[in-house]
Each structure stands twice: as structure tokens, then as C-alpha cells.
């Protein structure tokens, strides 16, 4: 008597082979199940293949249901859904209160789906580590409770005295856990937030907005600056430039954006010399004093500086700032000038040429590349680069020839040059003026 398989036996067979099928994949599911059936020796089994495939597909779909995902995978999905990694990085957040409101609203929506999702959201303490003074008091208390012992990112802003007072009462006991602080003093609050500012032993990132001076609280120590934090990342926006040296003792990345007072060589030098670990310096929309002062400047050495960014500056400002520094050939430079292109480079063209020549003579690399676009000129050799951007153009500006007259170091082999061109949409046949590459046609270079 021939063996006949009923539906329950087929479903059992699907269950037995499911793990193996997931191991080999579904690309050849028919032949896989056929082999499984033939191995059991029943000819009628092969006749039930369609039924077996149907049951197996349902089994696969059941395995792929989201509720069967492990907690760590769901947690990764939730983090992506609320853009958590971007939000917690204050170096990228431009409107933290708004982004925090969106995050908490999204978290609340996710945790209402079911109890398991609720438990995952609530139990992951870093989700609740972003605290803003503008949040309702009960929301701050809830977030601090759920954050447990996680490092905190705090935004302190002064809206009204009573609310700021409640905020300080809740946050001050957590000072040792604060790693990031955004201090917005646009509406005052210097005295109110001074105790918070002076108790940040573990702070790593600091952003200060609209500060006329560092808010500090008098202490019993001999120095009035005792207790001032020393973060690794500092961003000063629309603020005065504090020159208290301890503030910059550990800083590795410093951004000065729209300083509220004119930037002078002496002030910048005192800041930079107070920052022996400085690797990245960004000067955005700098207000320079005495641009027409032609007195000689003693350039300051910055041997550890890896990147100097001069953003939203005119040609005279760029030239003045470059004069202030004694840059290493390995230092990268990024310039976003309001008047770059055509004659806008004239004030600092010679300085860029000297920097490129220095990089070429000191390099051990066999080649370098030029990336030319209507809006940018980029020279790159090894890990260092010099990039000039000047707004958006449809056609190539008159980029200078930075290589004319170049003399290599003694015994230096010719350098290979790779040139990459980028055109704008609608101008596919546009090419840069050949004059900017004329200096490459000599024995020091080999055009690839």
C-alpha cells in the first residue's frame, strides 16, 4: 500500500526543513524540497510538492514578521526611525529643541504600538539622555529617570526665571554625567547658569550661543577660573571670544562662527597657543580688525593642525588669516570665499601657490590629483588637500595656474597628475580654461 501524506505531515516536513532552507537560501527552493522529499522514499511525496511549497512559504513569512525580530534589531530600527545618532551629535544639530521635540514625539508613537515595543523604548536609556530647558518640567523628570546613568546632552536656555530655576534644580545633581552642553544665552541667564557651567568635570562637547563672556561662579579657590571646563570640542556662535586658557587646554576641534567682536591676530594667537591639542580650526564669517594694517605679522606655528577652514570670508580676510599661521605642508585647507573665482582669488593666490609648492616638495607620494568644477578647485596629495569653493557657477571661472615656475626638490622624481573635471547639468561640454593647467606641461609632472 502506497504511503499517502496528509496536510499535517506536509506541514511537519516544512517545519523540519525550515532551518536548513534558511541556511541554503531560497534561490533553489523547488529542488531543495524535492531532494528532501525524495530522501524519504515516498513517490506520493513528490506529488504533494505544490502543497509543500505553499506551507513552506507561509512558514517563511511567519518567520519574517517584525514581532519575531530580536530586541537588538528592533532597537536599531527605532534608532534609525528617530535619527538618534545624528541628533545626539551636537556638532551637527542646528535646531536642537525642534529636533528633540520630533524625536520624543516619534518615540511616544513607537512605544504605543505594543507592550514589547514600549518596553524596548523605555528600557534603552540613551534615548532619554537629551534634555532641553524648554521641555515641560514633568517631561524633564521623566527623561532623567529613564536615562538612568547614561551620559547626558543638555541644552540650557533662559526663557523665564522660574522655569530656568526648576531646570537647574533637576540638572545640577547630574553634572558629572553631562558630556555635551549647548549654552544659549540669547535671552540672558549668565548668572543663573553659572553653577552649571562650573560643574562639568566630564564634558566633551560645548556649544555657546550669544555669550558676551564666560559665565563663572566665584569660588573659594585662589583662581576665579577654577572649575571652568575643558571640553574636546568647542563651537562659539555669535559670541565673544573668551581667552581663558584653561577652556582650550583639551580642545581638539574649535569653531568660531560670527564672533560678536572683531577677530584680531593677538586674540586668535592667544586662543590657539592655549590649545596644544588643536587639530581642526574653523573660522566662519570672521570679523577681522585692521585689514589694512600692513605691519608685519609673526606667523604662529600650529604643528598639530590637520585642517584649517575659512568659511564665508572675502579675499582680503582669507589672505589676512593665512598670514597669521605657519602651516605644515600636511595641513589641509578649506576655503569658502564669497568672491572666489575670476579675480576673487587675487588677494591670496600667491599664498595658495606657496602652500601647494611646499606640499609638492615635501611629499613622498608619487602622484597628486586636481578636481576642477565650476564652483570649486581642489588639490589633493596623500591625505592633505587644499580646496577653494566660491558659490555656484554654470561655467568654469578663470582658475589661476598654481604650477607655473614650480621647481622640485633636488632628486625628486616627476609627479604623476590626475585631473578630474565636473560639469554642471545643462553645460556638459564645458571645460576649464587650459591656462590653469599650462604649468603642468613640464618635466616635473606627468599628465595621466
Image: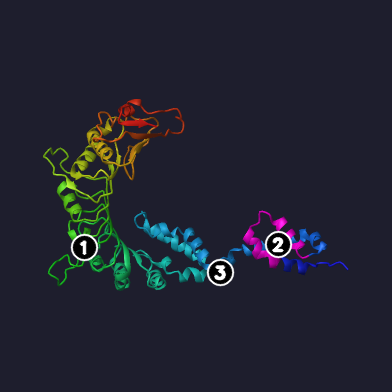
Query: In front of the other: label 3 or label 2?
Result: 2
- Majority secondary structure in the magenta region: helix
Location of mark 1 (residue): 215
User: Which quarter of the rendered picture does the C terminus lie within?
Assistant: top left
User: Which element carries disc 3, helix, strand or loop?
Assistant: loop
Give the spatial CA distance, label 3 vs label 1: 46 Å
Q: Which residues are magenta?
A: 14-40
How far apart marks 3 and 2 lie (CA) works out to 28 Å
Would residue 404 appear left or right of 72 to someone viewing this image? left
Kindly report the distance in space between the C-alpha atoms of the residues bearing marks 2 and 1.
68 Å
**Quadrant of the image containing the N terminus:** bottom right
Q: Which residue is mark 3?
A: 114
Mark 2 lies on residue: 56
Q: Quadrant of residue 26?
A: bottom right
Using the image as rendered, state which of residue 48 and residue 89 is in the foreground. Answer: 48
Q: How many neighbours does mark 2 have within 10 angstroms: few (below 14), some (14-19), or many (20 or more)?
A: many
Closer to the chain start, of discs 3 and 1, is 3
Along the line of sight, which residue is nearer the eye, 398 or 367?
A: 367
For mark 1, give the secondary structure: loop
Horizontal side, residue 183 vs residue 33: left or right = left
Task: Give the image location of residue 276, x and y in percent.
Answer: 21, 55
Q: Is residue 326 above or below residue 245?
A: above
Crowd around label 1: few <14 · some 14–19 · many ≥20 (10 Å): some
Amino acid at each position: 500500500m502506497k504511503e499517502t501524506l496528509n496536510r499535517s505531515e506536509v506541514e511537519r516536513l516544512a517545519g523540519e526543513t525550515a532551518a536548513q532552507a534558511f541556511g541554503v537560501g531560497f534561490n533553489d527552493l523547488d529542488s531543495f524540497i524535492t531532494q528532501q522529499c525524495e530522501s524519504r522514499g515516498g513517490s506520493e511525496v513528490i506529488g504533494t510538492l505544490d502543497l509543500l511549497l505553499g506551507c513552506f512559504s507561509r512558514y517563511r513569512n511567519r518567520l519574517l514578521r517584525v514581532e519575531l525580530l530580536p530586541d537588538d534589531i528592533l532597537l536599531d530600527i527605532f534608532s534609525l526611525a528617530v535619527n538618534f545618532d545624528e541628533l545626539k551629535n551636537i556638532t551637527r544639530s542646528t535646531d536642537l529643541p525642534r529636533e528633540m521635540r520630533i524625536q520624543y514625539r516619534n518615540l511616544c508613537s513607537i512605544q504605543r504600538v505594543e507592550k514589547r515595543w514600549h518596553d524596548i523604548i523605555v528600557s534603552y536609556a540613551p534615548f532619554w539622555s537629551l534634555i532641553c530647558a524648554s521641555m515641560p518640567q514633568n517631561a524633564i523628570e521623566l527623561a532623567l529617570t529613564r536615562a538612568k546613568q547614561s551620559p547626558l546632552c543638555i541644552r540650557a536656555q533662559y526663557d523665564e526665571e522660574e522655569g530656568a530655576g526648576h531646570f537647574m534644580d533637576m540638572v545640577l545633581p547630574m553634572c558629572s554625567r553631562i558630556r555635551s552642553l549647548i549654552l544659549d544665552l540669547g535671552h540672558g541667564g549668565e548668572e543663573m547658569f553659572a553653577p552649571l557651567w562650573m560643574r562639568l568635570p566630564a564634558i566633551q562637547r560645548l556649544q555657546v550661543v550669544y555669550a558676551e563672556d564666560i559665565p563663572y561662579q566665584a569660588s573659594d579657590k585662589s583662581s576665579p577660573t577654577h572649575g571652568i571646563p575643558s571640553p574636546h570640542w568647542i563651537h562659539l556662535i555669535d559670541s565673544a571670544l573668551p581667552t581663558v586658557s584653561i577652556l582650550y587646554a583639551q580642545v581638539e576641534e574649535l569653531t568660531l562662527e560670527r564672533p560678536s567682536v572683531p577677530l584680531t591676530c593677538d586674540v586668535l594667537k592667544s586662543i590657539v597657543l592655549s590649545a596644544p591639542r588643536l587639530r581642526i580650526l574653523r573660522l566662519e564669517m570672521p570679523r577681522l580688525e585692521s585689514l589694512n594694517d600692513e605691519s608685519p605679522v609673526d606667523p604662529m606655528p600650529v604643528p598639530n593642525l590637520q585642517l584649517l577652514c575659512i568659511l564665508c570670508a572675502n579675499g582680503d580676510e582669507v589672505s589676512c588669516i593665512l598670514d597669521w599661521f605657519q602651516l605644515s605642508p600636511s595641513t589641509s585647507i578649506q576655503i569658502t570665499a564669497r568672491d572666489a573665482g575670476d579675480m576673487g582669488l587675487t588677494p591670496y593666490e600667491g599664498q595658495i601657490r606657496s602652500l601647494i609648492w611646499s606640499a609638492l616638495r615635501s611629499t613622498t607620494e608619487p602622484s597628486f590629483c586636481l578636481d576642477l568644477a565650476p564652483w570649486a578647485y581642489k588639490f589633493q596629495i596623500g591625505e592633505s588637500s587644499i580646496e577653494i569653493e566660491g558659490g555656484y557657477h554654470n561655467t568654469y571661472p578663470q582658475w589661476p595656474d598654481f604650477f607655473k615656475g614650480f621647481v622640485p626638490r633636488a632628486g625628486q622624481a616627476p609627479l604623476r597628475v590626475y585631473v578630474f573635471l565636473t560639469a554642471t547639468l545643462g553645460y556638459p561640454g564645458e571645460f576649464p580654461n587650459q591656462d590653469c593647467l599650462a604649468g603642468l606641461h613640464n618635466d616635473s609632472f606627468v599628465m595621466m
